[in-house]
Image (cartoon, helix red, strand yellow):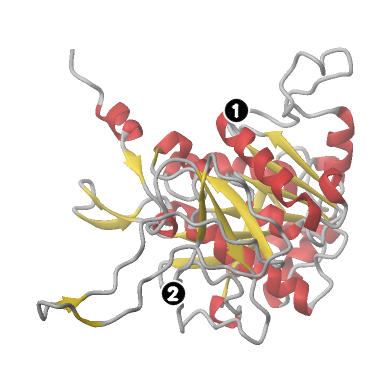
Amino acid sequence: MATCPFALAYEMEVLSEVHLECGSGCVVSCFTISSAKSGTLSGLGSSSQICSYADNDKVPSAQGRSSAAHQVDTRSGVDDDGDLIVARRSTAVLVPDRPRESILIYHNMATAIPLVGLQVWRGALLLADFIIHKCKNTSDFENVTALEFGCGTGLAGITLARHAKLVFLTDRGADVLDNCSRNVFANRGSFLRGESGVRVRELDWEEGWPPRTTNMQQAATSSPYLWSQQDLKDVEDATIFLAADVIYSDDLTDAFFRAVSKMLLPGSNKVEPKSYLKALEFLLTPPGAQALYLGLEKRYNFSMDALDVVANGYANFVGHLSVEGILIWSFLVSLIQDGAGENTSAAFLGKRLDDFTVPKYIMEYDRGTDLELWEICAAPQRQ
């Protein structure tokens, strides 16, 4: 029997560029947060120096300052035979002390596509840089309730938890959620509200909202990642939403926007004419009450349909963001018709942010033209 090509594609392993200098298997990387003065702008680039430890090594202490992960032999010259001595990267995995301003992330190396959430991707690091910059220069993220879609290792949400009141880290699959919980535990000391300020929950975009919940009687035997009634109540206060590296297929992108619409436009009973005015204001100024911040990496592959190299999912992603002029007209018409009724869907307004204005606080990755940062809000739209 022939093997389905789609099955083969899902079994194929992929590797994030962030991990190219790490070892193999499951490791923990220490991402160092530099000061604002030493942070470089995105166009300048930097070298990658990730502190990596084997899975069975002891996690380093938070009291140290060293961030060297891979030692390079810097000796140069010639040997006794006159041959050039080439500086080589040591293959030994060292266990340095953990820098005070850092984030520890357990992750895997190459994984099959369904488990890419076990890796760290560059879009998450760009989003983390943006969060750090906002927190250093504004109070927009202070004491907020936030939710991250498709959190993977949890890097972006963990960064935000240093300033937020409560962060929901959501994804699907026990392997990804277990690893995310491990990262929450490893970084709990830096959270504004401690470990209680972060909740890891399962959220499948293909399923409806609200998600499955558990009660006190079921808690002992059910998954630890099911939502409680208290969770559903608390998440209603969410004003900041995050997502990183979730755009890489059309089907996944469609499911993502369906899930986002449930959170940013929670129901027709909450849709008021002023929502349109807020959306109009968003076109001219940064969003007010709610916003989704999304970091993405455009991944290029050859398409047999287009007979060209394309970024999978990207065109569909942009297609979900309506043209501003059309939106303004539709808002005015909807206001005249006295707001939204039962047949209300979400219209997404997106701004691509200038990531060059965001300093590079996390030095262990390289930025390029294929990384983008978006700010998105949702407004009601008649169907």
Q: CA distance from mark 1 to mark 2?
A: 34 Å
Tally the numbered discs.
2
The residue wearing badge 1 is 174
Image x and y of residue 120, in percent: 51, 52
Residue 24 or residue 223, whichever sits in front:
24
Label 1 vs 2, first from the N-terminus: 2
Judged from the image, the secondary structure of the residue bearing numbered disc 2 is loop
Image quadrant holding the N terminus, namely top left
Image x and y of residue 27, in percent: 50, 46
Image x and y of residue 228, in percent: 84, 28
Depicted 152 relative to depicted 190: above or below: above
Residue type beneath disc 1: Ala
Residue 318 or residue 200, whichever sits in front:
200
Tag 1 near tag 2, CB within 8 Å: no
Please indicate whether residue 6 sits to the left or right of residue 51 in the image: left
Please indicate whether residue 296 sits to the left or right of residue 257 in the image: left
Residue 291 or residue 17, whichever sits in front:
17
Residue type beneath disc 2: Ser
Judged from the image, the secondary structure of the residue bearing numbered disc 1 is helix
Kindly give the residue lying farthest to the front in the view shown. 80
Q: Residues within 10 Å of mark 2 (few under 14, many from 20)?
A: few
Please tell me which residue is depicted at 85% across the width and 65% down the height of the picture.
Answer: 142
Could one spot residue 239 in this view of the protein? no
Residue 378: give its label.
Answer: none
Residue 353 or residue 85, whichever sits in front:
85
The residue wearing badge 2 is 47
